[in-house]
Amino acid sequence: MRQAGRYMKSYQVICEKYPSFRERSENVDLVVEISLQPWKVFKPDGVILFSDILTPLSGMNIPFDIVKGKGPVIFDPIHTAGQVDQVREFIPEDSVPYVGEALTILRKEVDNKAAVLGFVGAPFTLASYVVEGGSSKHFSKIKRLAFSEPKILHSLLQKFTTSMARYIQYQADNGAQAVQIFDSWATELSPVDFEQFSLPYLKQIIDTVKKSHPELPLILYASGSGGLLERIALTGVDVVSLDWTVDMADGRRRLGPNIAVQGNVDPGVLFGSRELITDRIYDTVRKAGRGKHILNLGHGIVVGTPEENVAHFFEVAKGIRY
Amino acid sequence: MRQAGRYMKSYQVICEKYPSFRERSENVDLVVEISLQPWKVFKPDGVILFSDILTPLSGMNIPFDIVKGKGPVIFDPIHTAGQVDQVREFIPEDSVPYVGEALTILRKEVDNKAAVLGFVGAPFTLASYVVEGGSSKHFSKIKRLAFSEPKILHSLLQKFTTSMARYIQYQADNGAQAVQIFDSWATELSPVDFEQFSLPYLKQIIDTVKKSHPELPLILYASGSGGLLERIALTGVDVVSLDWTVDMADGRRRLGPNIAVQGNVDPGVLFGSRELITDRIYDTVRKAGRGKHILNLGHGIVVGTPEENVAHFFEVAKGIRY
């Protein structure tokens, strides 16, 4: 369950005191405190670094902010070859030392009672923010670039690829025990374009990291991936995180037996009755079968979700016996 | 290509003169004029009634408006059994006579040079607007209802089902030669919930209409349906309209040989080069194979799309020889 604790009152209290998202996500003490909030209350098996997929951008010479109520804002959206040339490759040690420090502290605090998880954005998803200038509805700017000047987009994607492979290695070296790659917007592409603008870069990242860190589990998430599962299996990733729009039984079958699955209870279920939440957890677990399954929601918890229903989810999950 | 001409300058001119969407969509002369705009310029094989899936709501005692820049607004969102009781079943003859009149005129104007197409919203999609109060990001209100008081939602869905079956019959009786059912938001449901809150109602509509109008082709559209295709095939619909997130070859295979397909070029492709547009049309047509395919975009044309690229799409499409 990513988006560490945004639905929690304790997080809202920190937000009032530190209204800047960038400050909350770039100050070691705050990162550690926020990362631990859901763990302290619910004791899940994983603790997720509080950060954002866009955090590396300023270290790549792409100034940005995350504005409350609006989302990410890229101050100077990238559309030209000249702008891509200005993008620096990411050196995490120099640009985001607070991430490494926070991961190291989290490992100590959690003391092997849970896994500490890092994450990065996938090249296409990062590029979509950077080209669109922020969140987008139709992704028409990045599609204009992809479909009229593909070379410019490919060179931007390559910079993100090299940088994110390095960022995963850095997170692992500093304590992350698994890293999730978010290609949230890959599914805005048709499968034939996914094969051009996302898949090869995901493969490159995974191949690179597997060489240096063969034991590090890599997880891949894409929203609404029902049209892409067989292609996602080709990335070589260890775990595919499914959102709730794919039935877990279908996901298992379509991904094949070698890939583990994560997910995929609809976060909307947490607005329902306790009984229904219990039913859906068991349905998901039964469909995933024994082993190779990380029980989770299919996406982040929606703000407004009753915290007691989140607690119920964990209670039921912990009571499952195979 | 639905959303008749919203990207066209000639439509923007009408919008300036008649800024109310409801006026434009409820005045016979305007409906006819707007419906014919794309046909006059591009001569496609189909002319789509200018309307909205929410048009029936006021006739069902659910007051609403469509506000520029904001989208649909339901003045009194429905959450209780008492409110559902107040929903009237839809009598198109009484509530939307302008729809029947417009369809009749369109048939005459088009004079069998193209098919005249009607459309309706599917029960779950209509319910999602009515419960959420408009567009939604997380659909948490309708999910709260579905997952804690399913009976209330089911009775609302049944009212929409009876009403929309009747509305399709009315459209056909007044000249529509095919009718598309938009279940745009069905894919916000997990497949297990689609089976409860959408599929049975779609089947009921299709069964009812097939009895009275066995020759009327019915088309079903759901956005991002890659997780649902096999279940959508169970509705008994004649044609499935695929958006671009499913590869046409995969769609064909997963839907089986008896269902025709519509779509599914990414509307974002129209922001690309002419060459690329041509390539993607041929790729789609080749994957769909001979027969049982309505070549189309996978979704509405995005506002801002260059009109000359739309023209190019039609030119290439008309030049295809099997």
Image (spheres, coloured by chain):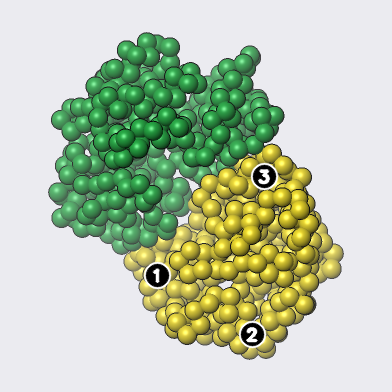
Chain colours: A green, B yellow
The residue tagged with tag 2: helix, strand or loop? Answer: helix
Which disc is residue B305 wearing? 1
In the image, residue A54 above or below residue A111: below
Who is closer to the viewer here, A122 or A132? Answer: A132
Disc 1 marks a residue whose amino acid type is Thr
Seen from this angle, which residue lies furthest right?
B211
Q: In x, y percent, where is residue A55? A: 27, 38
Who is closer to the viewer here, A10 or B196? Answer: A10
- Chain designation of label 1: B
Whichever of callouts 3 and 1 sits on the residue coming sooner in the sequence is 3
Q: In x, y percent, where is residue B221? A: 62, 59
Q: In x, y percent, where is residue A72? A: 32, 48
In the image, residue B65 above or below residue A190: below
Disc 2 from disc 1: Cα separation: 28 Å
Dot in front, 3 or 1: 3
Whichever of callouts 2 and 1 sits on the residue coming sooner in the sequence is 2
The residue positioned 62% from the left and 76% from the top of the image is B49
**Contact? badges 3 and 1 (CB < 8 Å):** no
Task: Classify 10 Å Cα crowding around label 2: few (below 14), some (14-19), many (20 and above).
Answer: many
